[in-house]
Amino acid sequence: EVDTQVVCQSPAALQTVRASRVDWGQTTSTVGSAGAGSAVGRTQSRQTTQMSTRHEPVHVGAPPGGLSDWAITPLHFNGFADLPTTEGVEVRSPLFSCFGHQWITAIYPGGDIDSNDGYVALFLANRTEEYIEIVYKYVIKHPNGGGDISISNRYGNLRMFSPMDSDGDAVNDAWPVRANNNFMLRSTLMNYLVDGTLIIEVHMRTNKQGQPSTPFVPENPFLRNALADFGNEETADVRFEVGGAVECGKGRRKRAKTPTTAFHAHRYPLRMNAPALADMCKVGDDSPTAISNVRPEIFEHLLYYCYGGKIDQDDLQSKAKEIIEASDRFGIVNLKLEAEACYVDTVELTLDNIVEVVTYADSKNLALLKEHCMDFLSSANKIEVTEKVPFDSIPSYLMKDLLVAQARGEKTSCKDGKFGIMRVSEFRRLAQKKGLDV
């Protein structure tokens, strides 16, 4: 085995110190076959193998994130043939950086004191006051396309480099310098010169120490800024007066007077999200737009939604029908659908109220609620349905929806691109995916 040289460095020179264990092993690009002894070992291993249970690894500290890609630094030793060949005389490279550390490579063209005759020695030194573990190798490419030289540290394992100027740590095999006393025959290297220059590529890789944390990037501020401007009287260009009279009673023939409430808004979010409401505001008219038959609390929810706000779930559940009607009136389609979905989850259908609910769904074009009603009828006891439900009060064209609901009970999906029995939510999702209005 080849002895290892560990160098304790000082600013003036590299002083050679004998290490207590082997560090370098020389390998080439040619891989030999396993010997007969290996085959015997494998046979014995098979004979003594027993079943075992492997548990998940237990990590102490942060696990490494795997090895990085190779970082390659080409070193040009110009005029290599003329470099001094006296034993123990070194030629150093300038400092170079890799993985946040400073490094030096020292070459001994005439070998070091522990080199075999004719061999060149090569040292790699950490010049940073920190430990680092790396895998490293040297590659010298043949100038005429012949076989390249590739020499790596023993077994290609991670090697610990201790801080510069430290004495090293034999127990943990950590040294400031790693040496290969018998790097390569000088006569061989003479055949790899490029215009008289010996080019040695230093390849290094290290632990990633886990994936780096994702850099923080603030989200698009548009929504936050829009919500911050909600109700801003100074920047608003639209004013509403809500209240004054609200229809009441089943027939809605009577009007109850209520106090008016002023709301300030901006045309842009209204034009994008509530077109019918935006059309009510005349450009250049500073007078407030009167809104009746809507409670101020409901109107505020509508405006807040137009600015990108989210309505509280409890409010959606308790005021679903009011929000549906106001959204339908002012063209806030997505809010209407959200309130509809909430109403479907909370409404309790019976054979006594089914006609009222399904006609309401039809009048407001609430496809999801209508589907919910038809699913209820198709799954109910048929005898009870015929006895208790006055079908003459249901528009006749809704009978097709009832048949579709029954068909869905027999078939769970539509084939061949037919949408006849596709569920409303599935259809809406498909439309949204294709960029169509829901």
Image (spheres, grey):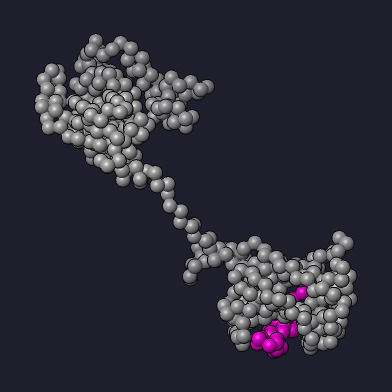
Give the quadrant of the N terminus.
Answer: bottom right
Left or right: 208 as drawn, with respect to 249: right
Return the x and y of residue 36 as percentages of the image width and height: 79, 69
Asked which quadrant contains residue 335, the reply is top left
Residue numbers of the magenta segment: 1-28
Give the quadrant of the C terminus.
Answer: top left
Return the x and y of residue 305 as percentages of the image width and height: 31, 37
Return the x and y of residue 350 as percentages of the image width and height: 22, 24
Left or right: 65 as drawn, with respect to 427: right
Q: As rendered, which of 430 and 266 lies closer to the eye?
A: 266
Magenta stretch, main secondary structure class: loop
Q: Can residue 299 be seen in this view?
A: yes
Does 381 appear above or below 426? Answer: above
Asked which quadrant contains residue 151, the reply is bottom right
Q: As rendered, which of 189 and 92 lies closer to the eye?
A: 92
Q: Is residue 14 magenta?
A: yes
Q: Can residue 330 be seen in this view?
A: no
